[in-house]
Image (cartoon, rainbow, N blue to C red):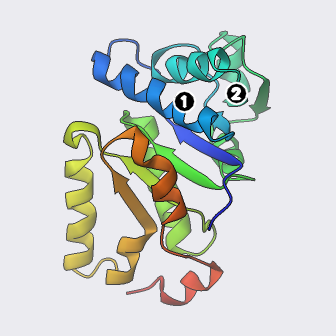
Amino acid sequence: MKEIKQVTVYCASSAKLADKYFDAAKRIGEVLVQHNVTVMYGGGAVGLMGKLADTVIENKGTIIGVMPSFMHQVEWQHKGINELILTEDMAARKKRFLQGTDALITLPGGCGTLEELMEAVTLKRLGVFIKPIIILNLDGFYDPLIEMLERCISEKFMREEHREIWTVIQQPEELIEAIKNAPEWDHSAINFAAV
């Protein structure tokens, strides 16, 4: 059984989203605190980032933000989190997200969230990052992306084995079991990264 001490959550900063997405971010925060899991996220104070942070803080959990300095300069950071790690740029931020984490979870999000997720998928394919990657497919939000990944496999841009890089869940309450039951992955994945 995988030990889960810290999870990185990729999530959006938009404040104009439907209530169901804020509810999902809240439920993710509650699940992680209930299981004594430290949360690492983008450090923001608004949107799903803000809801996640507020929830973890209200439930007396631990949450760490990772933010590039230029965002900090315009005061995008949440002021109530346990720790804020500043990075030189977005690339360093993404690298930091993967350090010391036991899993990644991706909530619905925009281009930044998608970019973070796809880089993690690529690094896992190469055996650089080997932890579970969980996609919260709330109300089918990620159906087009999952269909695209399946097409990559069916048209031989990726292997059948690469389907085990990610795990899709429909509800926040499935998160912990999904992490624990994610297929094993190791650094030898580099040996079958090519098709």
Above or below: residue 17 compared with residue 186: above
Picture coordinates of residue 166, whole percent (x, y): 42, 62
Neighbour class for label 1 at 10 Å: few (<14), some, many (≥20)? Answer: many
Left/right placement of residue 136 relative to residue 101 reads left
Closer to us: 126 or 5 = 5
Picture coordinates of residue 13, whole percent (x, y): 47, 21
Above or below: residue 20 compared with residue 136: above
Q: Circle 2 is placed at which residue position?
A: 61
Q: Circle 1 is placed at which residue position?
A: 29
Picture coordinates of residue 165, whole percent (x, y): 44, 68
Above or below: residue 52 compared with residue 5: above
For badge 1, the amino acid type reads Gly
Picture coordinates of residue 126, whole percent (x, y): 55, 75
At horizontal 65% and vertical 10% (from top left) the residue drawn is 74
At horizontal 50% and vertical 18% (from top left) the residue drawn is 51
Query: Quadrant of the image for the N terminus?
Result: bottom right
For badge 2, the amino acid type reads Gly
